[in-house]
Amino acid sequence: MKVKLVLRDPLRHKDQIDYDITADDHELAQDWIRALKGLLQSGNLLEKNFCFMGFPHTARNLEYLCQELEAHISVINQFFPDYQITETYTPDTVRGYDYAENGINHETMNALHNHFERLQGTVWNLSDYYRRADYETKYAIRQLNNICHEMETLILSQRKLELMPYWVRPSQITTFINAERYDLKDTHRQGFLTNGYDRVQGGVYMHWTQIGKTLFEVFRDEDAPVLTDTICEAITELRYYSGEFDIEWGNDVTFESHRWHNEEQQRFRGWLEENGRDPADSRLSLGYLPIGQVDLRASFGTTDYKTIWEILGSHLDIYRIEVDGVTNTFDYCWSDADYKQLQIDRMKPGYDYSSRR
């Protein structure tokens, strides 16, 4: 089964390219295709302001993202007299003081993500703040998470472009407003055991359809802490799948090809065992679930990462998706003056449902 995506230049809409994905031949990939067709048929809004991550020369630069974040924080602070976000976010505060070493100011970004988790809660246990919020404030809360991750990937990619260009990690996160979720099956979870944390160029992976940190993120971002009850409250295992998907545009990072990746995974498994977790337990959701592969040579005429990044870099706007005779065109862009209101209007049914529930 093939999936075709048509991209365009967000400033010159007639300048378009396309590429094809070949879906894997297993149950989860087949379920993903059915779910994706459902999203295209129902006309769900594509979330274009949280789509292409880690492309160093994007128009959504760090200054723009900080301005957007401050605007959303202002909405939240005005709505909640009992919850105030007091930190200030500028390019200088989100970059680490040791930028050459780490790039990101992890303390600042962790605090931002904690605000999001406290204000929204989880898919299955929404917070009181989120239930009370009006439409604009719910939207602003959502953007805390989106912009946090977008800034982190941008900072890391810009730093790597200066120091280690090969290791820039651009990616694509293809999500839809109010995408229907389905319970992840035990058979789906076998991909965690066979793939682990391997990522390959052009690899297509199931999108993580819920909020919360993974065990690997806690291990890597918080310096392998002891798993206390407080830390565990923020950790979630994957419960759902949908028609949403991620694409790895960076170079391969696999267990066999890079010794450092192998060693990191060995340390991670040791940390899990020290904290009473079984690395072979697929319910822990340790890794990425592969569902397809971009046909790089057929789509771009090459597998050279620099050439592919250059082609993609000026076409960071998904215009159309086609699969098995089902097509949807997304003729809008994150830079449109009415894009924010378009998103809020499409989210209202989901907001109303979650508040009632």
Image (tube, rainbow, N blue to C red):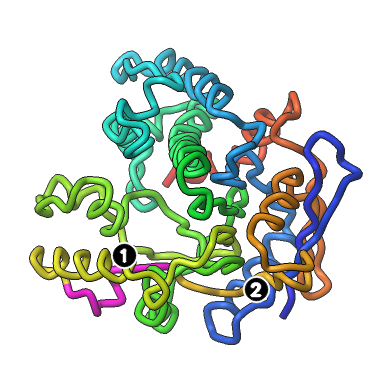
The answer to whether 7 appears left or right of 56 in the picture is right
Q: Position of residue 246 (x, y in %)?
A: 56, 60
- How many badges with numbers are in the image? 2
Main SS, magenta residues: loop
Q: Residue at x 58, y 77 (%)?
A: 31
Tag shown at residue 236? none
Whether residue 39 is visible here, answered yes or no, is yes
- Label 1 environment density (alpha carbons within 10 Å; few <14, some 14–19, many ≥20): few
- Front of the two marks 1 and 2: 1
In the structure shown, which secondary structural element does the residue marked by tag 1 occupy? helix
Whether residue 116 is visible here, answered yes or no, is no
Residue 47 lies in the magenta stretch: no
Kindly identify the amino acid type of the residue bearing the numbered disc 2.
Ile
Query: In the image, which residues are magenta?
Result: 278-288
Tag shown at residue 260? 1
Q: Residue at x 80, y 42 (%)?
A: 9
Circles 1, 2 touching at the beta carbon (< 8 Å)? no
Name the one closer to the observer, 266 or 305: 305
Q: Position of residue 70 (x, y in %)?
A: 48, 18
Name the one closer to the observer, 69 or 348: 69
Residue labelled with disc 2: 33
